[in-house]
Image (cartoon, helix red, strand yellow):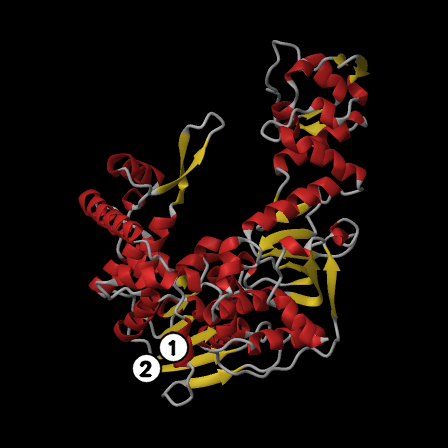
Amino acid sequence: MHRHIVIGPPGTGKTTYLKKQVDNLVHNKICSTQEIGYFSFTVRAAEEIRDRVMDKEKWSKDEMKAMFPYFRTLHSLAYDRLDLKQAQIMNEYDYVFLSEQTGNEFVNRMKKGNGVDISMPTAKSEYQDIINLSYAKYPNDEDRLDKVFRHVKINDYGARDKIKQMALDLSNYKKDKDKYEYVDYFIRFLEEQNPPKLKYLFIDEAQDLSAQQWDVVDMIQKKSGALQTYIAGDDDQAIFRWAGADIEHFIRMADRNNENTIIPLTESYRIPISVHTLATKLAQSISQRIPKEYKARPEEGIRKVLNVRPLNKGIQEGEWLILCRTHEIVKSVCDALEQFGWLYKCYGKSVVNLEYITAIRGWTKLSRGEKLSGVVCEIIYKHMDSSRIKRNYGVFKGDQDDVYDLERLIKEYGLKETVTYKTTEINTREAAWYEMLNAKGLVKKITYLRSLLRSGNKIDEEPRIEVSTIHASKGGERQKVMLLADLSYGPYKASIENQQGRDDEARVFYVGATRAKEELYIVQRADPAHFNYEPIFHYERQCR
């Protein structure tokens, strides 16, 4: 078994290199597609490479899955090989039950307005996150919790005892109920040592693997019969140490003194010169890393420091990715975009419900005298203000294959000819969509939708602005990137007080900056006293 370590900065084509190797195996029939294992950090990334390999074939998604059963995440592989069922997976009700039975907080809690505590079952408590982190970082150590306490700086021995008791309660519950969490998939998978038979193994985004996941990779390599293994990553983009990522393992593997073949990629197809200059300064500040040199694109590109106010007028044109250091900043940016009337996506999803857009667009056409299908009319009626419909016509029940205009809806389906809106008599034919539709579940968005119209945005178009945390944007790219790298919040401000923390933050900013293909704007708040953008502005000043 031989390992090839593919190392490349952002945009140098690490995934493309792996794709070429898979292409060669498949199209030259060197092995069966079912003998290739391709494992990435997300399901989407693994499926994307599968689709890219077979982009010339006219197969369905189901056929592709059958032909490439091992293009997936390591978690999903373990789940399938263990033949687990969904009912065996710990869910929100299990955590709520555990909290009630033990008196410990396995779920986060929040205060209602009346001061009563309510559970938030979808959000695991910080203590439970620490338990899971201990397995990810120190899977083979009996004293894993004590080690992770030192790692996350929990010096309160009362808190330590509580976490240890929670870990015991959780373990006993899972044994009693035959339940599993993510960390348990790997524990059992490693115990059973039953990977699929593979001849070629590919690991993408390897810098993000935890110690436990590296144990799984090593086991697959040894037990699957793999002849060749390709491992691709970039330690400078390792931004999941807080979740247990073992960066040091990847760095050791890339040591040229061992038996692995090192494949450096040295030309970025994404990053222009101005962004490359800043990114290089950020990377070079990291104390423990694999030295790399790579060429930028020949274009100079644009790099500027802005005041936050250009968020209103500075994004008039083009495709934008707005990156934030924290979820709190994401929320404040989204609030500002809604105030300014910009259509946007948040974490890859449009904030405007597609069905409601269909209702708006449909009502606009009806009011212009156009005809619509029964399907669209049904959606309109679903979102229509009940005061606009005669009492005995609450739901549209027309023929889905037929067509309807306003006259027919008034005559046959109970739409009122005239209605009273506040104090003004409005003809139904001329009523604006925001007067006719009540936007069930989206009432709070009405103001935003109206501001979209005032700003000239077309609400049925694909949003050209996306907002995300830097962590959630990993692997993406955009022509224009706006980076808000705030470190003023307590935990983050404290994180840069030691070298490892500064290294981690430099990696985060490095990932954020290198999403830009043409233009990078680093945003500075108007009130610097309450905002801390170090260390990124430190490097920015060095680059001038």
Depth check: give the residue in front, 234 or 308: 308
> Residue at the location (58% across, 29% down)?
441
Q: Name the image quarter holding the C terminus.
A: bottom right
Coordinates of residue 472 in the picture (x, y in percent): 53, 56
- Place of residue 344 in the rendered image (x, y in percent of width and height, measured from the top left): 67, 47
In the rendered image, residue 258, in percent from the top left (x then y), is placed at 37, 88
User: Based on the displayed image, in which of its 4 quarters is residue 271 positioned?
Assistant: bottom right
| Amino acid type, label 1 | Thr
The residue to which callout 1 is attached is 229
| Cα–Cα gap, marks 1 and 2 | 7 Å
Dot 2: what SS? Answer: loop
Contact check, label 1 and label 2, Cβ < 8 Å: yes
Left or right: 80, with 492 as reference point: left
Q: Earlier in the sequence, mark 1 or mark 2?
A: 2
Q: Amino acid at mark 2?
A: Met
Give residue 330's position: percent from left, percent from top. 60, 49
Residue under circle 2?
Answer: 1
Given residues 521 and 461, the one toward you in this image is 521
